[in-house]
Image (spheres, rainbow, N blue to C red):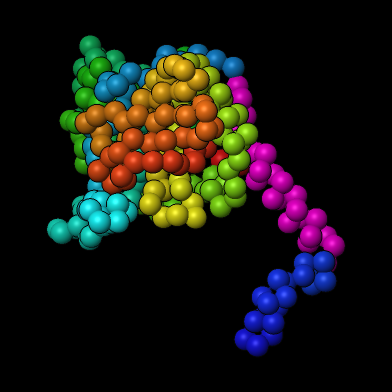
Amino acid sequence: MTGLLFLVKRRFDLQRFLPCAVRWWLGGFVLLALVAGCARRGPSGLSRLEYPRDTLAITNETQWVYGQDPVTGKQVHVVRDPPPTYSLRCFVLARTVKLFHAHAEFAPTEPPLDEPGYRARIREVARRSPRRSSEAGKRAVIPGYEGLNAFSAAWPKLFQDESGAAWESYVQRGHWRMIFPFSQKHQRREVVALAEGVRDGRSPVVHVVDFPGLRINHALVLLTVSESGGDHHFQVYDPNTPGRTVELRFDGRRSQFVLAPVPYFIGGDVAVYEVYCSWLK
């Protein structure tokens, strides 16, 4: 312990204590973190997501009930009582929306399936990659429903069972990015790429954070985008509030994303980056 404290006080001289190869590896990783982004692809060949038809009807419940302290103005929370029955799956549900958009085809006029049949179709889609889309003729056909919202409303338990476990939200491969700085330049590049992704039908899923703060660590799916006065306005699907869309705005003057108030977040500045879009994220 004494030796450790000594090193901390001396700011842990990397030049002295780390071999050259390790220093280069760490430096390269930090540089990669600062510049890495998702591969920018051309049009996906998919139509844009339509709300609510192409989004889930089930809710990712929060572990706490949130509010704002009337004196300090800070966000506060208390444990939810009774506890939630389906929670910690914001990334799982956001990914599911993207997966069904990329790999499923709805056929409302075809005869419906029974429970095992629909379970198998959900499982088939859930096992595909969110980082690519299926070609025509290779998509999973979902008979009897016009879209994901109606399908998930009719079979909520199947979606809860087959979309993914809570731990999958914790180990999403892009989480490493949140611990590194988000420069104004990075966020300006990101908003341009995200707007292109919405218009191209890529259905971008974004990780929204305020690290090192702990007020928000969440996944959203971008539905539409508009521009005015140098700002970008995204309407998004929020797994926590599926009954309405939420606005995510990019303030062009400040090069800063701003999330509107929602039941679990009092609103304010956030950092944003796309996930489920490359081997790194």
| Above or below 222: residue 241 | below
| Percent coordinates x, y for residue 25 in the rendering | 76, 55
- Residue 260 lies left or right of residue 156; in this view the side is right
Which residue of the protein is positioned furthest toward the bottom in this rendering? Answer: 2
- Residue 130 lies left or right of residue 13; in this view the side is left
Q: Which of 186 and 36 lies nearest the eye of the viewer?
A: 186
Stretch of the chain drawn in magenta: 19-41
**At x 46% / y 48%, what residue is drawn?**
210
Residue 38 figure quarter: top right
**At x 65% / y 82%, what residue is drawn?**
5
Q: Which of 89 and 129 lies nearest the eye of the viewer?
A: 89
Magenta-span inclusion, residue 24: yes
| Above or below 90: residue 115 | above
**At x 58% / y 43%, what residue is drawn?**
182
- Residue 191 lies left or right of residue 56; in this view the side is right
**At x 33% / y 18%, what residue is drawn?**
50
| Percent coordinates x, y for residue 54 in the rendering | 32, 23
Which residue of the protein is positioned furthest toward the right in this rendering? Answer: 20
Magenta-span inclusion, residue 248: no
Magenta stretch: dominant SS?
helix
Is residue 70 among the parts visible in the rendering?
yes
Q: Which of 94 and 80 lies nearest the eye of the viewer?
A: 80
Which residue of the protein is positioned furthest toward the front in this rendering? Answer: 71
